Amino acid sequence: MKRELLSKTNDKVFKEIFTRNKSCMADFLKCILNIPDEEFDDLEFLDTHTRKGSALDGEYILDIKVKTKSNIVDVEMQVKRSPILEQRIIVYLANMVKDQSCEGFKYKDIKKSVSVIIAAEHNVTNDNRYFHKYNMRDEKDNSMFTDLLEVDLLELKKLPKADDGTDLWDWLRFIKTNNEEEMEMLARENPEIEKAYDALQDLSNDEAMRHEAQQREMYLQNELAINEERYEQGMKEGMEKGKKENSIEIAKNLLGINLPLEQTSVATGLSIDEIKNIKSN
């Protein structure tokens, strides 16, 4: 019986596909990074664990970390929505820069640090563009301060159904679709996508990999539920705090026109003791 193919937006599956063939990783990154093809000649996969030693370090592991001749690139599959995506990516970039420092380090030798984020199930920006490139520029005249830090954001939900004629569209469509006929068509048109498709089929027939992918999906679902509960609780507490602050301001105004304490309490919902405390202050 033919096994259902694993989802390529599962970050464990995504990592396995792209780390099995350097040429697949290089071909995908060529569509995103504005650097010469020869930069990818010596592409190397790096340890994805961050180095300890500062308050920025946490218990996390990057999805894929690669080095080209003059770039360090982190490729992240953002499976579920995250309210702290931007903050997390900033920490990743900071650690990628820090990890380059060593004895004899010279500032002129620093490599460009890039985070490539593939947002799978949610929109991060409010426009219709599926590819955004961010770096350090002046907010008025758009002049570049430095290109040593870069974030490339790819949003799968915004990918148009019609081919836009770019190799990036082909890769993202391959990552997004679960339609085998469509994957086979894309594989016929790009030999590197064909390698990725072959890797996906191998992984889908691997029982251990299927189990890992399922466990990862369950973990992310639980994490999302916990984060949503925390968000809702935070919103509730914020609304209650805002309501209380508003009642205090109303009480101050009412006391300012000498409204009796009892009536002020009824009008604001605050206790008599709270009203007395406001009046004494």
Image: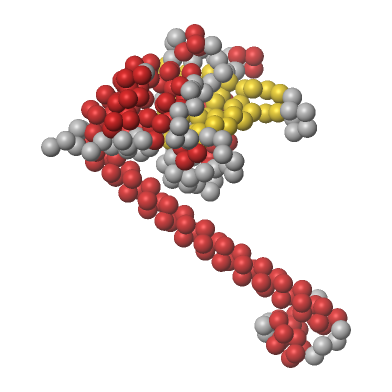
Residue nearest the observer in this picture, 255 or 126: 126
Whole-percent x and y of residue 206?
20, 33
* Colour convention: secondary structure
As drawn, 237 above or below 215? below
Q: Quadrant of the image for the C terminus?
A: bottom right
Q: Is residue 52 left or right of residue 21?
A: right
Whole-percent x and y of residue 62?
44, 33
**Residue extending furthest front?**
162
Give me the residue at 58% from left, 32% from top: 132
Residue nearest the observer in this picture, 202 or 191: 191
Q: Can residue 62 be seen from the camera position used here? A: no
State the count of labels: 0
Q: Is residue 106 left or right of residue 27?
A: right
Give me the residue at 72% from left, 72% from top: 246
Give me the residue at 41% from left, 21% from top: 25
As drawn, 173 above or below 258? above
**Residue extending furthest left?**
1
Q: Quadrant of residue 148?
A: top right
Give me the residue at 61% from left, 70% from top: 240
Whole-percent x and y of residue 258?
85, 87
Q: Quadrant of the image for the N terminus?
A: top left
As drawn, 205 above or below 220? above
As drawn, 25 above or below 63? above
Residue nearest the observer in this picture, 116 or 166: 166
Q: Quadrant of residue 79?
A: top left
Q: Is residue 159 left or right of residue 113?
A: left
Q: Quadrant of residue 66?
A: top left
Whole-percent x and y of residue 255?
82, 83
Q: Can residue 108 be seen from the camera position used here? A: yes
